[in-house]
Amino acid sequence: MQFNDFMKQLGRTNSTLDSFVDFEKVLSNVDKISIKLNQLNYLIGKKDIPHAVKELYKENKSCFSVLKILIAVRDNKEVINPNGKVVYLNSYFENENKIIEYINETGLIEVFKNKSIKNLVDYVFGIEVGLDTNARKNRGGKNMENLIAAIFNENKIPFETETKSDTFPALKSLGKDIKRFDFTIKTKKKTYLIEVNYYNGGGSKLNETARAYADITPKINQYDGFEFVWITDGRGWFSAKNKLNEAFNAIPKLYNLTSIKDFIKIVRKELV
């Protein structure tokens, strides 16, 4: 197959409706902090926010620990305070004065005063939905893995998943770093170590992936009885066409969802 033909075969998308948002995870994340969020609702509509913060702090100071999520942050990130000092976000929740500073500096004070938010539980639900979109690429990759597994099953090809490289002591060239392969297929002739992915969009990740797989191929293929296989697809590759072309010339067994039938034919012959 010619590289241009390979590019023409790339699919438009592998997204499914359930791959956009994991609502079960979103609801779980919100539920874990819903009590504290409801307590923070006390601040909504108050004209004197500093006073309201002090009153709420007397009742339950722990409820302020969830203030990070109101600015769409989960982690204890480092930030620069008004004095130019690098501090952790969690340090703002140590006392009422720092909490007031946090609410002022983030702009939340006006949001609370003006009732821009009606209910913090509903507001955080929206934030969690937005944050969950960052996981779409992972779900797209999982869709691809599920599809490849279905193809193997349909063709009655036995396979293993998530196989670690140290399972094969013969592959000394891979070094001490443990690599995990998406699929492994063992025939009477060879053991195929397979990576699969799907890219709907571009980005530096594609160049890195193509380079890494081109590098690992000769390290595996030098051993009799082992061969590296890469199955990839998606229009995202048009943004990294040159690097994919290099990989195409370096990896003998590089397939997409159309040409995978050629790999299936090879494997089925070797299983007989």
Image (tube, grey):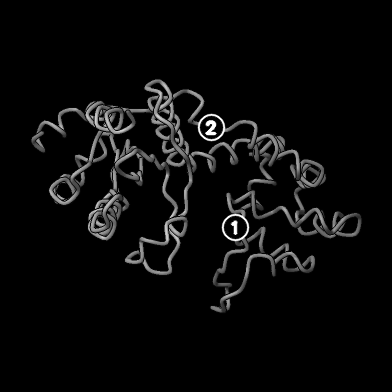
Q: Is residue 126 left or right of residue 213?
A: right
SS under mark 1? helix
The residue that appears at 25% across and 54% down in the rendered structure is: 221
188 or 10, nearer to the observer:
188
Q: Amino acid at mark 2?
A: Val
Give the amino acid type for the residue marked by disc 1 in the picture. Thr
Quadrant that contains the C terminus: top left
Residue name at image x 48 percent, y 46 percent: 162
Q: Nearer the viewer, residue 264 or 58?
A: 264
- Left or right placement of residue 147 versus residue 62 in this view: left
Q: Position of residue 242 (x, y in %)?
A: 13, 49
* Residue extending farthest top: 154
Q: Nearer the viewer, residue 265 or 103?
A: 265
Using the image, determine if residue 217 lies above or below residue 272. Answer: below
Rendered-image quadrant of the N terminus: top left
Residue 238: quadrant of the picture = top left
Mark 1, residue position: 106
Which label was assigned to residue 114?
none
- Using the image, determine if residue 228 lies above or below residue 234: below
Residue at left 43%, top 30%?
A: 149
Pointer 1 with pointer 2, Cβ within 8 A? no
Badge 2: how crowded within 10 Å, few (<14), some, or many (20+)?
A: some
Occupied quadrant, residue 151: top left
Foreground of the two, 37 or 246: 246
Q: Residue 21: which numbered mark, if any?
A: 2
